[in-house]
Structures are given as C-alpha cells and as structure tokens.
Image (cartoon, helix red, strand yellow):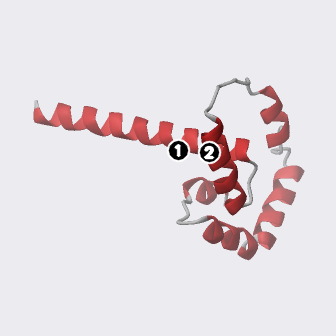
Amino acid sequence: MLEELKQMSFASEAEEAAWWRSHEDELLDEFKRATAEGRVGIGTVAKRAALPSTTIRLDPEDIAKARVQAAGRGLRYQTYLKMIIHEALRNAESDRISASSEKAIST
C-alpha cells in the first residue's frame, strides 16, 4: 500500500480526503504491520522540527490575500504559502526538465 500511496495524485483536497476515509482500515492494518516489523520511524512532527527556517518579507496586501485564500482551504496562511512555493518550484523544475529534453531531442 505504501508504494501505491507514493504514486497517488489527487485532483482536489476533497478527493484526497475521501481516499483517506475509504482506506482507514487498510492504513491501520499497514501501520500495525509496520510497527510489528520495526519499520515505523521518525514521524513528520520530528522531521518538521529539523527543517531550517527562512524569513522573507512580503507585501502586507499579499499576506492578507494569502490569509483569505488559506482560510478558504482550512489552512494556516504560513502552510498555504509554503504549499504555493513548493508547487511553484516543482512546476519550474518540471518546465526546466521539459525544456532540456526538448532541446536535446532537437539537436
């Protein structure tokens, strides 16, 4: 199930939430097996504490917009900003790889 979960992508948060709800029993069984086999490691909370922090200055209007948009998703605005940055970096990397591949094919 772990490999399946790594490959999953969801069209929306609601779709992802529905998936987690519909697989609760399977996930619990997998967690119990992993615990019994000693495969349970450091959790997200511990990893999060080890992440470096960064300070960026943002326009107050941008922060206000982020707060409104985050609230609409049920998130804290800092979490929402981190998601936006992560998505933008992932998209930029994907675009860079695509452009590099297209360049290699055309030469």
Is 8 displayed left or right of 82 in the figure?
Answer: left
Q: Amino acid at mark 2?
A: Met
The local crowd at label 1, few if under 14, some if 14 to 19, many if 20 or more residues have their Cα within 10 Å, is: few
Quickly name the residue at label 2.
83
Image quadrant holding the C terminus, namely top left
Q: Position of residue 48 (x, y in %)?
A: 78, 35
Secondary structure, mark 1, is: helix
From the top left corner, tell me how far across and down residue 86 is, in percent.
57, 40
At mark 2, the secondary structure is helix
Can see residue 82?
no
Mark 1 and mark 2 residues within 8 Å of each other at the beta carbon: yes
- Residue situated furthest bottom in the rendering: 22
Q: Real-space Cα distance between discs 1 and 2?
A: 6 Å
Which residue position is annotated with label 1?
87
The residue located at (87%, 51%) in the rendering is 35
Q: Residue, x 57% and y 66% (percent of image)?
A: 12
Up-down relation of residue 55 to residue 86 (above or below): above
Identify the residue at the far left of this view: 107
- Residue 54 relative to residue 88: left or right: right
Vertical relation: 19 (above or below) 58: below
